[in-house]
Image (tube, rainbow, N blue to C red):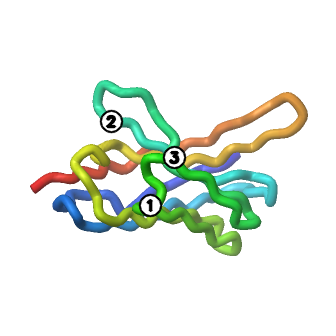
């Protein structure tokens, strides 16, 4: 079982920055992929970025260059640095751990942290 706790959300002005953190407790295994997703009001949850334990990253195309994901394997923590934030980045951001193998995938989710970009 994995428990995820996000922190770092809040209200920020357009052009500002925020850094989200997600600490995982329980068993995190090397093949687990950690990542961030977001869900804006009235929209489906969408990928923000993912990172493997080896540091390989994957980003939503629209966010490349503004968002940076990183991971501290020793602390079982994943971070999301968000720069030059825009009002359309307003959403609840969810931490995710994806665990898979032959023919299965298990997703663990945090409770979400609200990010609001507004002047």
**Left or right: where does residue 26 sit relative to residue 78?**
right
> Where is residue 104 shown, x and y percent of the image?
81, 30
Do labels 2 and 3 touch, CB within 8 Å?
Answer: no
Name the image quarter holding residue 52: bottom right
Q: Quadrant of residue 75?
A: bottom right
Residue that badge 1 annotates: 67
Give the numbered dot on residue 60. 3
Q: Position of residue 96 (x, y in %)?
A: 58, 47
Residue drawn at x 38%, y 63% is: 82
The relative height of residue 44 versus residue 12 in the rendered view (above or below) is: above
Does the rendering let one see residue 113?
A: yes
Q: Are marks 1 and 3 in contact (CB under 8 Å)?
A: no
Left or right for 3, reference 6: right
Of tags 2 and 3, the one toward the viewer is 3
Q: CA distance from mark 1 to mark 2?
A: 17 Å
Kindly report the distance in space between the C-alpha atoms of the residues bearing marks 1 and 3. 9 Å
Estimate the spatial distance between the alpha carbons at disc 2 and disc 3, rounded to whole Å.
15 Å
Q: Which residue is mark 2?
A: 40
Residue 94 or residue 25, whichever sits in front: 94
């Amino acid at each position: 079982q994995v428990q995820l706790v996000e922190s770092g959300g809040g209200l920020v002005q357009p052009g500002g920055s925020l850094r989200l953190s997600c600490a995982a407790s329980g068993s995190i295994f090397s093949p687990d992929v950690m990542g961030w997703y977001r869900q804006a009001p009235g929209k489906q949850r969408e990928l923000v970025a993912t990172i493997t334990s080896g540091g390989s990253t994957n980003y939503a195309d629209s966010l490349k260059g503004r968002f940076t994901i990183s991971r501290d394997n020793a602390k079982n923590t994943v971070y999301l640095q968000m720069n030059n934030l825009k009002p359309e980045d307003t959403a609840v951001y969810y931490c995710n751990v994806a665990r898979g193998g032959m023919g299965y995938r298990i997703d663990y989710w945090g409770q979400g942290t609200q990010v609001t970009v507004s002047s």
